[in-house]
Image (tube, grey):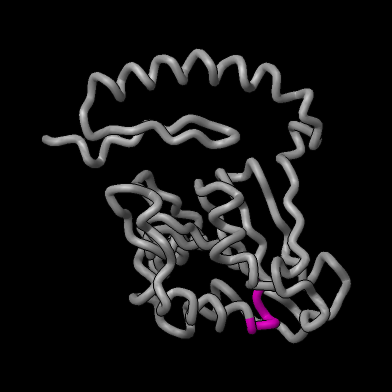
Amino acid sequence: FVEGGVELSPTKERRDDEHSGDEGNSPLPTRTLSQLGQQELQELWPRQPGQSNALFLDYDGTLREFEARPELAVPSPELMKLLTEIDAREDLVPHIISGRNQEFLQEHFGRLTRFTLIAEHGFQISTAPATSSGQPEDKLKPEDNGRKWQLWEHYGGNVRFFKDHENWKAIMRAEISRLVRETPGSHLEEKRSSLVWHYREVPD
């Protein structure tokens, strides 16, 4: 799992300590990906013939730097080139995990046929059409690549379960709207699964 460019596996020295039975009490040390050698990368993600490795990528703050307003943080041409190259790798099972909504991920990444897209931190999921449809990639619909979105299984895809969900949102929407009125520069963003109060543009 890659978030913020930090590799979340222990350093070689710490792994050696763990193997020797000396777990210690210090926090688990980590290093950025650029500090890992090819041999260590191979140990962490070994390649086996016919075996695919899962790759989970966070969007905001990792693939794309933060902006004052979320709608400004769209993927750059360089990022899309990189993701397209990853999309062509048959030895990877890539995912993008994001707090963004389904519409944003569909618009910008829907054409990546090997990527599973996870919106609103898991509330909605679109599995890779190249692997879930059973169709060859060149036969998928060009407008959406045959993507289908599913709700988190807790809701069972049944809108009746949204009643309680909408009840708490109505209460919080009123309170956050009050905060927005009292805090110039902030704004409310509403998603299907949550309400977000943005305050990056609030003067210090």
Could you say which is closer to the camera, residue 99 or residue 181?
A: 181
Where is 145 relative to 123, above or below? Answer: below
Residue depicted at x 79% and y 37%: 157
Residue depicted at x 62% and y 52%: 118
Percent from the top left, x then y, of residue 199? 27, 35
Where is 87 relative to 14, above or below? Answer: below
Residue 35, quarter of the rendered image? bottom left
Percent from the top left, x then y, of residue 197? 37, 31
Where is 185 relative to 168, above or below? Answer: below
Could you say which is closer to the camera, residue 201 or residue 46?
A: 201
Which region shows up in magenta?
Answer: 88-93
Percent from the top left, x then y, of residue 148? 76, 56
Could you say which is closer to the camera, residue 197 or residue 123?
A: 197
Residue depicted at x 33% and y 48%: 69
Left or right for 159, reference 202: right
Residue reaching furthest to the right: 134
Residue 33, quarter of the rendered image? bottom left
Where is 70 relative to 110, above or below? Answer: above
Residue 140, quarter of the rendered image? bottom right
Percent from the top left, x then y, of residue 136? 83, 80
